[in-house]
Every structure is written in structure tokens, then in C-alpha cells.
Image: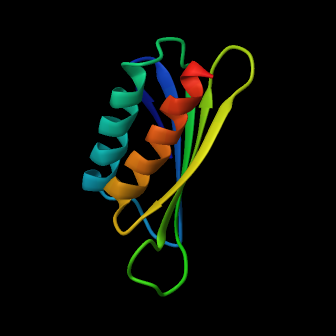
Amino acid sequence: MNYTVDSIKMDLQTVGFSETPELLSQVESELRRVMRFRSDIVAADIYLREEGSNPTDNKTVRWRLGIPGNDLFAEGTGSSWAAGLRDASDKLRRQFVD
């Protein structure tokens, strides 16, 4: 699904399940957190997938940020969507300084 968050085009893809309003709220919250550290973001592509049957760390988040120049990409995992989103966003933030 395509959304717009503060003029940033966000494409949220879920594999094998449908997004809920709570999940969308978590994604938007994490995107806003990332936006505090980088003001030139023009797009965000977020892919959510449950992998395997292991109840811990089975949620995978792949996140691509469209910025001027080369896009940034990070992948995070966690036992919940919030943990996976935070893992991926922390990896993106580390790329901001490099």
C-alpha cells in the first residue's frame, strides 16, 4: 500500500498477511523517528515478512530510504514488528554518518 507521511512517499508491502492500523502506526512512528536525523528523505519502501516457525526473531523488515544520491538499505529482525523496525532503523541511522 502507498501512503504519504509528511511529504514522503511510503510504500508498505506485507508478505503473507495484511497490515493492521496498529502496524501502520508503528511503521509511521519509526519513519518519523528516522526523519529527525535526515531531512532529505523523499521515499521509504518497507517490506515486512514473517519467516520460519521460530517465534523469536521471525519477523524480517527490509527498509529502503530514497535520498538524493545513493539510496540507503537496511534489514532488521525481531520477535515483534516494533523490534524489527527499530533494528532496521538503527542500521539506517548508522549509515547517515558514513
Quadrant where the C terminus lies?
A: top right
* Residue located at (49% from left, 22% from top): 8
Residue 50's x, y, as percent?
A: 50, 72
Residue furthest bottom as drawn: 53
Residue furthest front as drawn: 98
Residue 65's x, y, as percent?
A: 59, 31
* Residue located at (49% from left, 46% from top): 88
Scheme by which the image is coloured:
rainbow
Residue 38's x, y, as percent?
A: 47, 17
* Residue located at (38% from left, 82% from top): 55
In this rendering, the count of numbered labels is 0
Q: Nearer the viewer, residue 69 or 87?
A: 87
Q: Nearer the viewer, residue 18 or 44?
A: 44
Left or right: 33 with respect to 77?
left
Task: Establish if 14 lies above or below 74.
Answer: below
Task: Establish if 48 lies above or below 5.
Answer: below
Residue 2's x, y, as percent?
A: 51, 39
| Quadrant in which residue 84 is drawn | bottom left
Task: Establish if 50 lies above or below 34.
Answer: below
| Quadrant in which residue 70 is drawn | top right
* Residue located at (63% from left, 19% from top): 67
